[in-house]
Image (cartoon, rainbow, N blue to C red):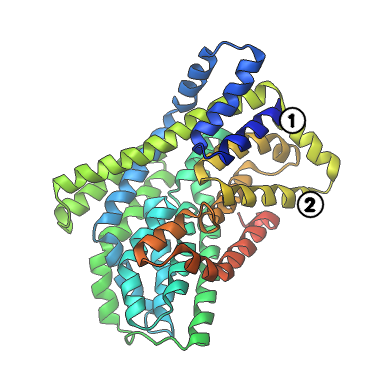
Amino acid sequence: MGALIFISFLIFMIVGIPVAIAIGLASLVVLVKEGMPLTVLVQRMFAGTDTFPLIAVPFFILAGDLLAKGRVSGKLVEFADSIFGFLKGGLSVVCVLASMFFAAISGSGAATTAAVGTPLIPELKKKGYDEATSAALIAASGTIGVVIPPSVPMILYAVIADQSVAKLFLSGFLPGSLMGLILIVLAIRYAYKNNYPRGSAFSIANVVKTFKEAIWGILTPVIILGGIFTGFFTPSEAAVIAVNYSLFVALFIYKDMKWKDVFHIICRSAMTMAVVMFIIATSSILSWVLAYYSVPTAIANAVLSLSSNKYVIMLLITLVIVIAGVFMETASALIILTPVFLPLVSGLGIDLIHFGLIIVVGLAIGMITPPVAINLYVASTVTGLPIEKITRSILPFMLGLLAVLLLIVYIPLFF
């Protein structure tokens, strides 16, 4: 039955059926073959989405969209530039730091790429930076958007694996910072290799000025994460607070948005969320069918028969995660792979919070690896460059992020 499910899923994908529908159809094939009542299909779809923590997902998506469309991202870029712009190639360092700032607001890789790329790409081009390399760096930095909390994929993983969202959020800071650090090192290397210019001289007065202007954006993660970690409110409540705060800043502080703009943003966020929820609904059928036929247990036994070495098995699991991220959208890959691997990693004694970091970071790298590569498509849209040109420049940044992933896999003491 496991083979039938996966073969059916691959066939549906190859013929061009959307991932969410392909997942549901693959499950339907098994239900029909086994003669099960098709009401199971509808029941499991509703059961998969009837989970309170999932309320946080649409609100974090909406908060990220609200802040990305306003002046918050631009102010964060200016603040980062005031601190590090004086370095050689400092503007490329600012790309990474601004992405890390915005990652602590949006919870989305695509939103982070768009929010940072829109104000920075014209400046990078004007100052003589290679446009394809700059676009690749911003796309790679966008992957940090789903690692530094709040993170939509972490919420999905927490629901599936029955883990604490707050613990996952707390454990995401160091991996996200390491991803940023390796990208900064590579950016500086490129700056010296291509003799990129230095920015304006460092000035305390300018830092203070830009900090005052960016304080409303900086306060967003402080309010959201501070409230979660102190226990003042839950992640779901934090998501709603994030939306209200984003609306307040956009409408009454920066005044860069009208109510009609809010309506359009809500509509766009609703469309994004509809896709995510449909993937969750159909994936819950697949998870139920896999569990019913003990497929995860069978996979665990098969992998354990290959090797008893914990580190070899973790390398194999990581390889599967990265390959899945290449061909599948992050949410659907996470929802499918998590229940498959949970029995195996539990049997190996791997902490499930640690595994959550591995799967989120592994799938995040898929955001810059074609053919799916959502961050590359966003960067292509912002720059107007063909995606093939950006793809040629992404390899060094992708290798750097893979090195961080292996560090996360094999040094769990830090997480």
Find the distance from the CA under tag 2 to the CA under tag 1: 18 Å
Is 228 placed left or right of 183 in the picture? Answer: left
Q: Residue at x 63, y 41 (%)?
A: 352
Please state, as top left, top right, bottom left or bottom right, where the N terminus lies in the image.
top right
251 horizontally vs 75: left or right: left
Residue at x 26% of width, y 50% of height: 246
Q: Does 274 sit above or below residue 172?
A: above
Mark 1 Cα-neighbour bin, 10 Å: few <14, some 14–19, many ≥20? some
Residue 392, quarter of the rendered image: bottom right
Q: Quadrant of the C terminus?
A: bottom right
Identify the residue at image location x=36%, y=66%. 384
Q: Position of residue 201 (x, y in %)?
A: 33, 87
Any mark on residue 297, and which? Answer: 1
Instruction: Look at mark 2 in the image and give the residue it sits on.
Output: 312
The correct choice, above or below, for 355 with respect to 79 in the image is above
Q: Report if residue 79 is visible in the image.
A: no
